[in-house]
């Protein structure tokens, strides 16, 4: 996240491969004064229980697996 922010390229959203990465991205954004969701959108995948306590809440994608 820090390298992306340092690059100076404009972006409007971050799609993290899992919720833990989204948490890390959120901390980096917070430290730089970037507000989620006012300045940037943040999406995490996994729907970890701790995601329910994020303020404001991130968008979370729930992964459902089926076995044949």
Image (tube, helix red, strand yellow):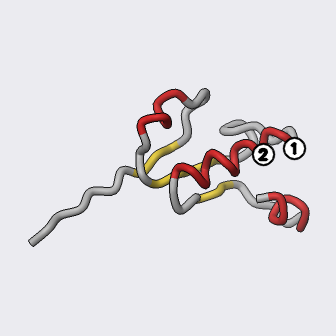
Element type at marker 1? Answer: loop
Q: Tell me the crowding category of disc 1: few under 14, some 14 to 19, or many 20 or more residues within 10 angstroms, Cα based.
A: few
Task: Please state the horizontal and vertical placement of residue 62, each as a whole percent of the image.
Answer: 36, 50
Quadrant in which residue 66 is drawn:
bottom left
Relative depth, front residue between 60 and 28: 28
Placement of the C terminus among the 4 image quadrants: bottom left
Where residue 58 is drawn, which disc sits there?
Answer: none
Gap between marks 1 and 2 measured at Cα: 5 Å
Q: Residue at image x 52%, y 50%?
A: 19
Q: Residue at image x 53%, y 62%?
A: 17
Task: Please state the horizontal and vertical placement of residue 42, each as a whole percent of the image.
Answer: 61, 48
Q: Residue furthest left?
A: 68
In contact (CB < 8 Å): disc 1 and disc 2: yes
Residue beneath disc 2: 29
Q: How many marks?
A: 2
Side of 39 relative to 49 (left or right): right
Relative to 52, say whether 42 is above or below: below
Q: Tell me the crowding category of disc 2: few under 14, some 14 to 19, or many 20 or more residues within 10 angstroms, Cα based.
A: some
Element type at marker 2? Answer: helix
Relative to 18, say whether 67 is above or below: below
Residue beneath disc 1: 32
Task: Please state the horizontal and vertical placement of residue 51, each as a whole percent of the image.
Answer: 49, 37
Task: Please state the horizontal and vertical placement of residue 4, each as a whole percent of the image.
Answer: 81, 64
């Amino acid at each position: 996240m820090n390298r992306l922010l340092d690059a100076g390229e404009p972006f409007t959203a971050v799609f993290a491969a899992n919720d833990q990465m989204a948490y890390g991205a959120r901390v980096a954004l917070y430290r730089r004064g970037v507000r989620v969701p006012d300045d940037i959108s943040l999406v995490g995948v996994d729907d970890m229980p701790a995601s329910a306590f994020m303020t404001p809440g991130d968008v979370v994608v729930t992964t459902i697996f089926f076995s044949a």
